[in-house]
Image: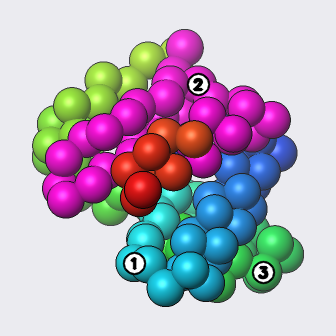
């Protein structure tokens, strides 16, 4: 998450949690992370989000200020005023799908990409 609205970011986090739960119920391994780029300034907001939305099955975190640039470089993310969010779908440490500025209403695209991987 970068410059996304709180509503959309929360919606994406909830939908990711639902996806991870459903896959785990099928006995498959799956992990989900929602990472904010704003650094430590969003810590309290993230705690509140996790509590309000009962986020328990995915990790919600932020990039530490000191290592922010290194992580952005690692994931090949260039921040801009137009970037709201990026969703990565990985399988066996390889990028399988990438969605930029995804609206929570369009999360079905992520679900479809994920289902293609776990056939």
Spot occupied by residue 5 in the image (x, y as percentages of width and height): 74, 37
Specify the segment rendered in magenta: 82-111
Q: Residues within 10 Å of mark 3 (few under 14, many from 20)?
A: few
Above or below 9: residue 17: below
Q: Which is closer to the viewer, label 3 or label 1?
A: 1
- Image position of 72 (left or right of 37): left
Q: Secondary structure at mark 3?
A: loop
Q: Is residue 118 left or right of residue 22?
A: left
- Determine which residue is flagged by label 3: 54
Q: Position of residue 112 (x, y in %)?
A: 57, 41
97 part of magenta stretch? yes
Numbered-mark total: 3
In the rendered structure, find residue 29 and report the number of the disc placed on it.
Answer: 1
Seen at 29% across and 30% down, the residue is 77
Quick check: marks 3 and 2 in contact, CB under 8 Å? no
Q: Label 3 to label 2, Cα distance in Å?
A: 24 Å
Position of 12 relative to 28 (above/below):
above
- In the figure, residue 7 lies in which quadrant? top right
- Dot 2, crowdedness within 10 Å: few (<14), some or many (≥20)? some
Q: Could you tell whether 7 is left or right of 83 in the image?
A: right
Q: Earlier in the sequence, mark 3 or mark 2?
A: 3
The answer to whether one can see residue 47 in this image is no
- Residue 32 visible at all: yes
Residue 101 shows which numbered tag?
A: 2
Return the x and y of residue 30 as percentages of the image width and height.
Answer: 43, 72
Name the residue furthest front. 119
Q: Secondary structure at mark 2?
A: loop
Side of 28 relative to 91 (left or right): right
Of residues 105 and 24, the one drawn nearer to the viewer in this rendering: 24
Is the residue 78 above or below the residue 51 in the image? above
Q: Residue at x 46, y 63 (%)?
A: 33
């Amino acid at each position: 998450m970068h410059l996304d609205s709180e509503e959309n970011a929360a919606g994406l986090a909830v939908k990711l949690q639902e996806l991870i739960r459903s896959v785990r119920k099928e006995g498959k391994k799956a992990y989900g992370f929602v990472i904010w780029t704003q650094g430590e300034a969003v810590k309290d907001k993230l705690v509140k989000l996790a509590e309000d939305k009962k986020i328990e099955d995915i990790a919600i975190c932020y990039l530490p200020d000191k290592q922010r640039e290194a992580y952005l470089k690692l994931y090949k993310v260039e921040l801009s005023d137009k970037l709201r969010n990026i969703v990565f779908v990985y399988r066996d440490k390889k990028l399988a799908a990438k969605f930029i500025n995804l609206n929570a209403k369009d999360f079905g695209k992520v679900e479809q990409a994920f289902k293609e991987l776990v056939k």
